[in-house]
Image (tube, rainbow, N blue to C red):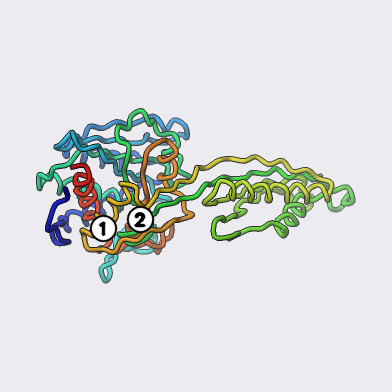
Amino acid sequence: MKDQGRTADAIAVNEERLLNSFLELACINAPSGNEQPVADYLVQRLTKLGFSLQFDQAHHAFGGSCGNLIAWWEGTDSDIPPLFFSTHMDTVLPTKGLVPVIRDGVIYSDGTTILGADDRAALAAYLEAIEVIQEKGTRCGPIELILTVNEQPGLVGATHLDYSLVRSEAGYIFDSSGDVGQIILQGPYSSRIWWEVQGKSSHIGLNPEEGISAFLIAAEALTRMRLGKIDDQTLANVGVIEGGELTSIIPGKVKMGAEVRSFSAEGLKRQIEHMVQTVEDAAMQHGGTATARIEKKYLGFQAAPDDLHVRTALAAAEKIGVEPYLTKTLGGADTNVLNENGLSCITLGLGFRNIHTFKEHISIENLFNTGKCVISLIEEWRAAHQ
């Protein structure tokens, strides 16, 4: 039976401590592949909170500085199923020399670096929530933290996570720009396409008639290709074109890279087939060839509104006085990969804005609400299993 008479005021964080934790984490320079400094910070904090810690060997797959961190705390009631919280330890760009600036209740960098609220804000909120839970003596089941590396380049750490080390089956990932209260029920399927377009090199001054420009093949294919927002389900983009040697040489080869995302596996397949066929047709018409390689990034996920962890998230948001709302996103997160590997989880918003830019920021209100929401989730998870 759920606790009675609880209000938004019943859940509080130590605001000064949470803000300081975030600022400390934001100032740690640990971009993708070089997460060891932030891992060292977390080891120190989590050890004091009584967590047992394990690192996997995921970093060996991509030459990183450390593996994913899996942390486990027994909680106070082993009859309650364990609950995990996950996020990533890396930032998309370095934060060396980061200078935090607070204006009108919003945290920015000084404009010379990113802020790294994506996703140091979640890390700080998790630490604060667990500290509050322990200080209050709140009854709860085991809490597990799954903290990944190399997320920003394409969920690489989660892809190579040693899932045998994970003991919980359900959880949450705070990693979206929506304000606290955002509950993302669906994420996309995503794949990359890599082409090698082959024409024929020749010298523009000596034998131009023998040349077949791979650039012209690529350009013609792009003008025929459906790109951008295909429909409400599917997006596509060509983001890489590489080739050429000298201005005097008709380019005989070009490399192209594209990405497709769709809420449906069929939509993904259909768009990939269209893009591959478009390049092949352009190459054939010019007397060249095109070879495509498809690289799966991640599978989609979808949770039902009446799933237990969705209902728990709705109740947790309401308990802290924020308006919950259900949505879906074509953005990828570790949520995709964890679900693909049998862990039931959804993405929640924590309100960072303009991520991956020097204008990145997060409101102090969203930071504090994230900490409160984590506490509320732990309490509601316990209530759901009583």
Residue on which disc 2 sits: 183
Inspect the image, locate mark 1, and give the three-letter code of the amino acid beneath it. Answer: Ala
Graded by Cα atoms within 10 Å as few (under 14), some (14 to 19) or many (20 or more), the crowding at tag 2 reads many
The answer to whether residue 37 is visible is: no
Quadrant in the rendering for residue 162: top left
Graded by Cα atoms within 10 Å as few (under 14), some (14 to 19) or many (20 or more), the crowding at tag 1 reads many
Using the image as rendered, state which of residue 6 and residue 336 is in the foreground.
6
Q: Are marks 1 and 2 in contact (CB under 8 Å)?
A: yes
Image point (40%, 36%), residue name: 342
Using the image as rendered, state which of residue 249 and residue 329 is in the foreground.
329
Image point (52%, 47%), residue name: 189
Inspect the image, locate mark 2, and give the three-letter code of the amino acid beneath it. Answer: Ile
> x%, y% of residue 114?
39, 57
Q: How far is disc 1 from disc 2 in space, using C-alphas? A: 10 Å
Quarter of the picture holding the C terminus: top left
Secondary structure found at label 1? helix
The answer to whether residue 366 is visible is: yes
Secondary structure found at label 2? strand
Image point (44%, 56%), residue name: 328
> x%, y% of residue 338?
40, 40
Residue on which disc 1 sits: 317
Most distant residue in the bottom direction:
104
Q: How many marks?
A: 2
Using the image as rendered, state which of residue 320 and residue 64 is in the foreground.
320
Q: Would residue 217 appear left or right of 299 to someone viewing this image? A: right
Quadrant in the rendering for residue 140: top left
On residue 137, the disc is none
> x%, y% of residue 340?
45, 39
> x%, y% of residue 234?
56, 55
From what the image shows, is residue 158 above or below residue 268?
above
Comes first in the chain, label 1 or label 2: 2
